[in-house]
């Protein structure tokens, strides 16, 4: 009787380690619009093909490009104004230095009248005020320059986000919009798959958890050197009595086929 029970437990144990999984791309990406605009072009023909890295969806960026051109011209003007203001400031400092020296020379002279001294002091103060005014103008121009550079960087970012590319070597699975459609921020544009590798997803039982973690992975009854790449330590939300496990394997010629997965003792 004990012998029969032992055989039964072994059979149950072996059966518990048999799973089936679909060979899927290692990762699926959904590229969503990061900017809003009308779709100027959408290369629907690339669906089902491997990406060459070129633009496949292009959103309207005409106004952005015009704004960028104008902003670059304004940036150039600001740089020139800063250069001129710096020269004016240097000259004003020289004048202020001369005015201050002239006042210092006569302020204690008894041969100079009070009016002459006051006039020279006024000239010195006016020269210092001119320096301060130019310094203030220079700081204002620098602030405008910083703002303009930020605006240009923002425009370049917006323009880049309106030219949608799928990384080279990825499978372009689906394009959601056609020419003439409108994309809002967050609108799905493209589904793409990373087909450089594949993964198998199985939901193992509590009894097979340690075996999946430390055992040998068999695929279609053949031992492999593959390991479980990810093994969740809490049960799945849908498969409430099972633990999700992912196994990474080399990319096959054809995806989506069903394979048999087992975990056995070493």
Image (cartoon, rainbow, N blue to C red):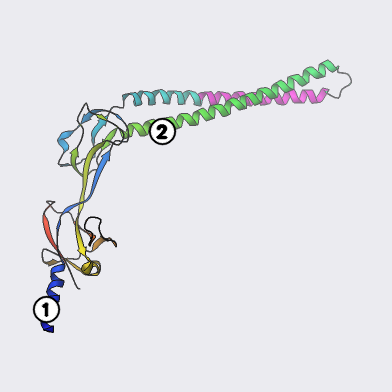
Query: With 63 as the anchor, is 3 left or right in this view?
Result: left
Q: Nearer the viewer, mark 2 or mark 1?
A: 1
Q: CA distance from mark 2 to mark 1?
A: 71 Å
Label 1, residues with CA under 10 Å away: few <14, some 14-19, many ≥20: few
The disc placed on residue 153 is: 2
Task: Please name whichever residue, 145 or 178, is drawn nearer the observer in this view of the structure.
Answer: 178
Residue 189 at what x, y percent from top left? 24, 36
The residues colored magenta run 80-106
Residue 200 spot, x, y in % from top left = 18, 57
Residue at label 1?
Answer: 7
97 in magenta: yes
The majority secondary structure of the magenta stretch comes to helix
Q: Is residue 111 left or right of residue 39?
A: right
Disc 2 element: helix
Location of the C terminus by quadrant is bottom left
Assess disc 2: are there few (<14), some (14-19) or many (≥20) residues with their C-alpha within 10 Å of its C-alpha: few
Where's the N terminus, which quadrant?
A: bottom left
Please tell me which residue is depicted at 50% across the width and 25% down the height of the picture: 78
Can residue 133 be spotted in the picture?
yes
Please tell me which residue is depicted at 79% across the width and 23% down the height of the picture: 103
Query: Can residue 169 be seen at all in this image of the molecule?
Result: no
Q: Quadrant of residue 74?
A: top left
Image coords of residue 225 (percent x, y): 20, 66
In the rendered image, residue 162 lying in the magenta stretch gets the answer no
Q: Is residue 94 left or right of residue 200?
A: right
| Lower sequence index among marks 2 and 1 | 1
* Residue at the image position 20 percent from the left and 35 percent from the top: 176
């Amino acid at each position: 009787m004990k012998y029969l029970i032992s055989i039964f437990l072994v059979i149950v144990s072996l059966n518990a380690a048999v799973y089936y999984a679909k060979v899927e791309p290692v990762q699926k990406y959904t590229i969503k619009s990061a900017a809003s605009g009308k779709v100027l072009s959408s290369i629907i023909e690339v669906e089902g093909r491997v990406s060459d890295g070129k633009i496949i969806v292009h959103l309207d960026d005409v106004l952005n490009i015009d704004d960028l051109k104008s902003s670059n011209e304004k940036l150039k003007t600001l740089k020139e104004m800063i250069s001129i203001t710096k020269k004016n400031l240097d000259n004003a400092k020289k004048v202020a230095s001369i005015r201050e020296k002239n006042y210092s020379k006569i302020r204690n002279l008894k041969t100079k009248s009070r009016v002459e001294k006051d006039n020279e002091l006024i000239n010195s103060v006016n020269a210092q005020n001119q320096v301060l005014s130019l310094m203030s103008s220079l700081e204002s121009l620098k602030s405008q320059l910083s703002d303009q550079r930020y605006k240009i960087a923002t425009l370049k970012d917006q323009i880049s986000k309106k030219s949608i590319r799928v990384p080279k070597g990825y499978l372009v699975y689906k394009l959601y919009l056609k020419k003439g459609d409108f994309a809002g921020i967050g609108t799905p544009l493209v589904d793409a798959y990373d087909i450089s590798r594949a993964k198998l997803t199985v939901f193992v039982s509590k009894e097979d958890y340690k075996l999946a973690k430390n055992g040998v992975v068999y695929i279609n009854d053949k031992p492999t050197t593959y390991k479980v790449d990810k093994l969740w330590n809490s049960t799945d939300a849908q498969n409430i009595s099972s633990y999700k496990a992912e196994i990474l394997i080399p990319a096959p010629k054809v995806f989506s086929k069903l394979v048999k997965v087992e975990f056995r003792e070493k």
